[in-house]
Amino acid sequence: MLTVQNLHKAFGQQVVFDGVSLQLNAGDRYALMGPNGAGKSTLFKILRGLDLPDEGTITFPRGVRMGYLPQETADLGEGTVLEETLAGEGEHDSESLPERRSAEAKKILMGLGFRVTDFDRPASSMSGGWRMRVAIGRILLQAPDLLLLDEPTNHLDLASLLWFQEYLQRSKSSILLISHDRAFVNAIAHGILDLRDQKIFRYVGDYEKFLACRVMEQEQILAAYKKQQREIADAQEFINRFRAQASKAPQVQSRIKMLEKMERIEIPPEIKKISIRFPQPTKTGVKVLSLKGIEKSYGDVKVYDGLDFELERGQKIAFVGPNGAGKSTLLKILAGVLPFERGERVLGLNVESGYFSQHRWETLNAGRTVLQEAMSNRRMNPDLLVRTVLGTFLFRDNTVFKKVEVLSGGEKSRLALAKLLLDPPNLLLLDEPTTHLDMASVDALVEALKNFEGTLCFISHDLYFVNALANHVAHVDQGQAKLYTGNHDDFLRLSARLSSSSAPSVGPSGGLSHSNSQKDVPRGGGPAWIKSSSDDLKRLREAEKARSKRRKKLNERIRELTEEIEDIQGQMGSVFIQSDYQKLMELDLGLKSRTKEMDEARAALSQEG
């Protein structure tokens, strides 16, 4: 499918790739990982022939068709949504009837959230996010042999993302993708290609297995580094002690040459979670906000007609539901940034709301630097805290001195989010906050928001982010917003336990279907609408909590055993040199015992899932 051999690429003095080799076979699906600036997008450009390597070769088998989805811009013409989706449908499908291709295109577009009435709309009249969905539809319809996907989930909501994810799982295409969405990566990729230190390293398994392997590698490198440092210190001490003695001159020279020829081990950057505790807001009363009888329309389209909705202190609510149901509209009404025709928005005691969306960066001061803008709030945060937070949101080193006016849209979005969290209101409303973040930054944001003491409402297509944060789900559809306890996975687990005769089942779109007619069941939007008793949810959460405790205990024991095994192995080396075979036998018995316990603990951990 794809062979890369000894790729070398540099921009001036900056070397991006040095001897990179890669083999991608038919059916392979890998996520390309690496820090910002490591060269992921450069590699995609080279694979597509838009840039040339300084050295090395790239080989595709004859007839291989490659499809590419860029991160931000969709190359569309002046046709309708349907016409642009069909554009580029190649000769490989020339035997298919046009009607069949058109029907498949419409099916794909509907899965991506388009309505039938959108098919004849000019694609150029739609927003950038919807044009990107047209581009996704086009590339899926082409069904190339190799798909290069650069942050493909950025412009999707949760419902369309789940549909897209399932479509790719059924696809026969090989896939190489760049994505910050951990759940999406785990669902699509069979392995990880880690781009670091100008090389590519291959790992089989999901993102969590990749992290575990990297940690183990670093522990091994650290152990080798410490051993080498001891050898260097011993050799240097010998040289210093006996340098002046003629009788020791040969040994001294031998050690000097050894040190000169020694290839020094360098400690790689640590893989670790960035831990930040953001400032906390003032405390509110129990009742945070109430919407009463809200009516909201866009032209002739009525979104809400008599909507009632309440927020209480400490709730972390994920808004889910079908595309176009009004999730973003509700979030803006709660934030007080969108007017409505009728009804009442009542704030509770001491409540201050703050709203963030990907495009809410117009309030930034273009003339300030990133650091100046981040520090311009009421809090007067310490410089170190501000710099650390900016680093979490990918503004590192000298980039904090860039002017806001030269930042990209994604950079401005990240800066607006960082600034909001450096002086957080006690009612935080976030619309797709993870779109321009990498995985480490998403982890840091999750941990910070877990500790957030105010009330949080958010929309996100990142399933990992939703499940990690939400303690409630609000299903928005048909002018209503119904609140349920738990996160997205709670409802999935519950639906799996209910009988097929009385419960919804997961349908091909990632939502739920039901064999019986139920007039009160909302359309689409996933499993959040399941009505169940609080006892069922309580039992599920208690079982999950117990399982989490068992996993934590097993992981702690595995870490302890790893340290004990390494310690015994270190002792065995010294004892062997001393020829103390009795002690060596005792250590060997201890090693076998701990190795057996390690295997049992890992097996138990595997059974826990």
Image (cartoon, rainbow, N blue to C red):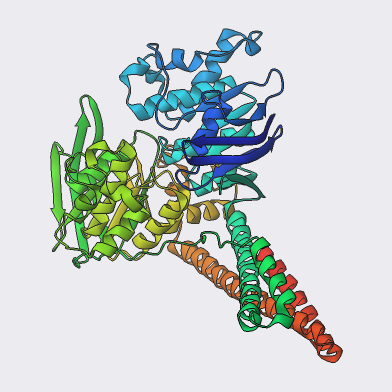
Does any portion of residue 470 appear in the rendered image? no
The relative height of residue 38 versus residue 123 in the rendered view (above or below) is below
Left or right: residue 393 versus residue 89 is: left
Image quadrant containing the N terminus: top right
Residue that extends furthest to the front in the rendered view of this protein: 246
Left or right: residue 197 versus residue 126 is: right
Image quadrant containing the C terminus: bottom right
Residue 189: quadrant of the picture: top right
Q: Nearer the viewer, residue 133 or 521?
A: 133
Does any portion of residue 194 appear in the rendered image? yes
Q: Nearer the viewer, residue 308 or 63?
A: 63
Rendered location of residue 514, percent (x, y) = 53, 40
Residue 287: quadrant of the picture: bottom left
At horizontal 74% and vertical 74% (from top left) the residue drawn is 250
At horizontal 60% and vertical 45% (from top left) the residue drawn is 199
Left or right: residue 465 versus residue 56 is: left
At horizontal 19% and vertical 54% (from top left) the residue drawn is 353
Rendered location of residue 176, percent (x, y) = 59, 36
Tell how many labels. Answer: 0
Q: Nearer the viewer, residue 199 or 201?
A: 199
Rendered location of residue 12, percent (x, y) = 46, 36
Rendered location of residue 489, percent (x, y) = 50, 54
The relative height of residue 356 versus residue 440 in the rendered view (above or below) is above
